[in-house]
Amino acid sequence: MVNHEQTYLPGQSGEQYQFLLSLLNHPIFIENADRKAEFVNPAFCALLGPDFSPDKLQGADGKTLHMLMGMQCKHQEAYTGGVENAIHSGQAETGVATELKNGRFLHRDYYPFIANAQLRAHIWVYQDVTPLHQGADSLKSERKAFMQVLSVIPADIAIFSPDHRYEFVNQSAVQDPGVRAWIIGKNDTEYCAYRGKPKELADQRAQYFQQALQRKEVVSWEEVLKDAKGNEHYYERTFYPLLSETEEVASVLMFGLNITVRKQQEQQLAMAHQHYLKTLDNLHEAVLMADGELKTYFINDAWRGSFGKTLEQARNGIIFDLIALGNYEFYRQVFSVLSGFTENVQGRIDIKDKAGRKRWYKYKISPGMREGEQKGILATLNDITEQVHMEENLLEVVKKQKELNDLKSAFVNMVSHELRTPLAVISSGAEIMQMMLQAGRPKEDMEVYTKQIINEVEKMTAFMNDLLMVSKIEAGKIDFRPERVSLEQFIKELAGERYMPWKDGRQLSIQSKGLLREIGIDKKMFRHALQNVVENAFKYSSGKAAPRLHIRYSNTYFTISVADNGIGILSTDIKELFTSFTRGKNTGNIPGTGIGLVVVKYFIEQHGGFVAVKRKAGEGAVFMIKIPYLPA
């Protein structure tokens, strides 16, 4: 309420105040206590129409002017009634919204002027707020369109205030329009009570709401609700905090999806998986599943009947606890499948049963897949002991005879080939030396021939050593004596002795990957095997880049790969490469006995590993030795 002790119109200063008020842009109308117009500025006259001016309206009836003003308003009766109510109340009013017929919006302020405890005048001030209303209408229109979009989205959507009260709920969340109208301003506790839902549901939502509010982070969870028939429905709920420009939470959006179908599919999948495992348990074949590190995560009940191992004893153990490391061929196939060289391989294996008797099994190894884990293996074992005994009795004699004949033929061919050349060189060298002695030539001139004889004798000696080694292997006279060594240091020492540099000047490249560790190997066997593979890489890549040796440590085994850029290996020769007296058809005049890789294969087998070879895309070959770590 305006309460001044002096009037502003009577007296000499009245004209000055009127002059100043006329300069204001806001429409102003002042009427005295008798409701006569004391002052009207041009801006107010413009509201009434072009025919009105301050001079014409001076002294006019105030009610009449308000009636004329009401005729400009969209809601005439509301305007005139509001004016009369304000005058009768005698209380100041501000910001009373008034909408004109031409689309403009005004805010009307009313101030009663009191002087000497008496009402002297009524002051009316108008403010054009059309731009604000137009912006508000635009926002209202955008919000309405946004809410319409949210309403038809096939998901539960709600908007909450920071105190966890509903500001908006779409049709998918609450289908009943009456309940949607009722819920605005309510919280989840009130809603759950109204709908007869458990209080724990409201408490859970409140807990997640507070997490989203306090952390200003998205929070998701799952809810299980029951319908009137008792059927369970699963929902995935998410609270999204919406931040203001000051990084405060202005509101929280809740998004809910009905995942009942997905849950039902997951349950059906789990039931199918259990049925699948139950089927495997009822098979007579022993079934084993292991991951990429050869840790078993499933074995069926047949293992207990065959090997005396229960699920609890073997589950999550290493596969070596179930099948001994000495089964070289089986683990060669396992590593081959793991490495991606082969898949769906089959073979035979002998394992002692729970009574300690040796029995034969036909195995099949395939790549295994386990959700969320790396690729492993699936192995099935079928008892074929009786079948093997019958086959052994029928084929043993024929097999032995054929092997003997083949070995004899191969041995004769190899010896005739490998011994003829060095003997010829020795013989011719000796004759030349004899002639030079008779001619009185100095011994320096004969040195080249003595070196030739020594080299050929060394080749013959190495050849005979290989033959003796094969003989010992076949007779079982070589003991496996492993000891702990640093593989890195062992290989570097060997390389330093023979391949740093090789006799043609090239040097072996060595790289390693993984956690360095000590391993258990028979140093003599492993040195002989590795030396043979590396020397072959140099021998069959003369004139090319030096061979490369790569060591890789995994959790359960280590791998040594030796790659060269040499003549490579024909695909037709790979299968026979590790059999006695067999050489590649593309070796030409490069010397070799055809028994070195036989020894390599046997020595690696003694370590429980395997050796494999593959051709490179262009030239060269890669020999890979994979050996599991010996038990501590």
Image (spheres, rainbow, N blue to C red):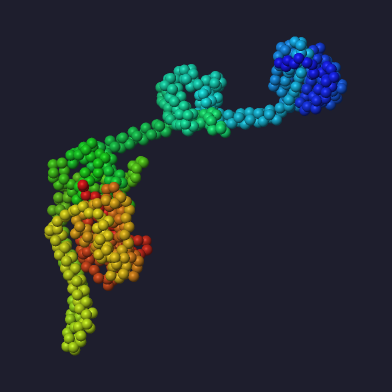
Q: Is residue 538 above or below residue 199?
A: below
Of all residues, the one furthest to the right in this rendering is 56
- Above or below residue 174? Residue 410 is below
**Side (left or right) of 511 relative to 596:** right
**Which quadrant of the rendered structure holds the N terminus?**
top right
- The residue lying at 63 percent from left, 30 percent from top is 139
Whether residue 384 is visible: no
Q: For this rendering, which residue is in front, 632 or 297?
A: 632
Q: Residue 542, how many percent across, how many down?
A: 32, 69
Indicate the position of residue 508 as horizontal and vertical percent values.
31, 63
In the rendered view, does 200 fall on the left or right side of 612?
right
Measured along the vertical axis of the image, is residue 59 above or below residue 512?
above
Horizontally, residue 97 falls left or right of residue 520, namely: right
Q: Nearer the viewer, residue 568 or 385?
A: 568
Q: How many marks?
A: 0
In x, y percent, where is residue 522? 19, 56
| Residue 55 in sight here | yes
Camera-side residue: 104 or 569? 104
Q: Who is closer to the viewer here, 280 or 150?
A: 150
Q: Residue at x 18, y 88 (%)?
A: 440
Q: What residue is at 49 percent from the left and 29 percent from the top?
A: 213
Question: Would you identify the image quadrant in which residue 535 lies?
Answer: bottom left
Q: Residue 76 placed where, x, y %?
A: 75, 18
